[in-house]
Image (cartoon, rainbow, N blue to C red):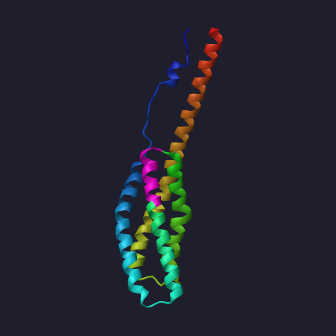
Amino acid sequence: KISYTKNIFLQSEEILSSLPLQMCLHYNCTYSTFWMLTRVGCLFYKFAYHTQLYKVLISIVITLMTVVEILRLYLGIVGNLKEKVPELAGFWMLTLFLQLPLQLLYTFSTYFQTLTIERATDSILILFLILEVAIGYFTVKAITSQQALKFKFILMKDQTASQETFLSL
């Protein structure tokens, strides 16, 4: 029996990892170490001049930003290189809904009394975050479309195989 749908199911693997996103993540990983060292250095410098409440708040915000940054970069790299949608979507949501607002709050809020070097380093990090949100959106969209197409092909292949088995009985 000849099947006319056999050509549709040929395995062709197209790599959908985003090179611009991977470059952005790589440079962000490199820059994040400098950003964290600058942030901790400025924190120790400012500790002597502020109230206890300010010290507690700023310590919590910086710790949260650092943990989220490490987790976010890990999810972004793994999700992009292995084309895993959950990790990539987690990276994108952490960037858009947690890291970018925290970074904007810390950089432009008058309450936190940021130093000039902090504003400079934070501005570069904000640029990375904005680029990663934009590029990450299109990467997630492309990878999910391709994954959905693969799933549909697998379903079609299973249906045609079961129909051929049924007809051969």
Identify the residue shown where x is 43% and y is 72%: 123
Closer to the camera, 124 or 69?
69
Nearer the observer, 21 or 82: 82
Relative depth, front residue between 44 and 30: 44
**Quarter of the view holding residue 32:** bottom left
Give the x, y percent position of residue 80.
44, 48
- The C terminus appears in which quarter of the rendering? top right
**x 55%, y 14%: residue:** 3
Above or below 159: residue 80: below
Say if the magenta span includes residue 95. no
Residue 35 image position (x, y, % from top left): 38, 71
Quarter the N terminus occupies: top right
* Res. 117 visible in picture: yes
* Horizontal and vertical percent position of residue 120: 39, 75
Q: Position of residue 31 (x, y in %)?
A: 36, 65
In the rendered image, residue 80 lying in the magenta stretch gets the answer yes
- Look at 53% across and 60% down and name the residue there: 94
- Can residue 131 be seen? no
Residue range corresponding to the magenta coloring? 71-83
Main SS, magenta residues:
helix
**Number of numbered discs overlaid on the protein picture:** 0
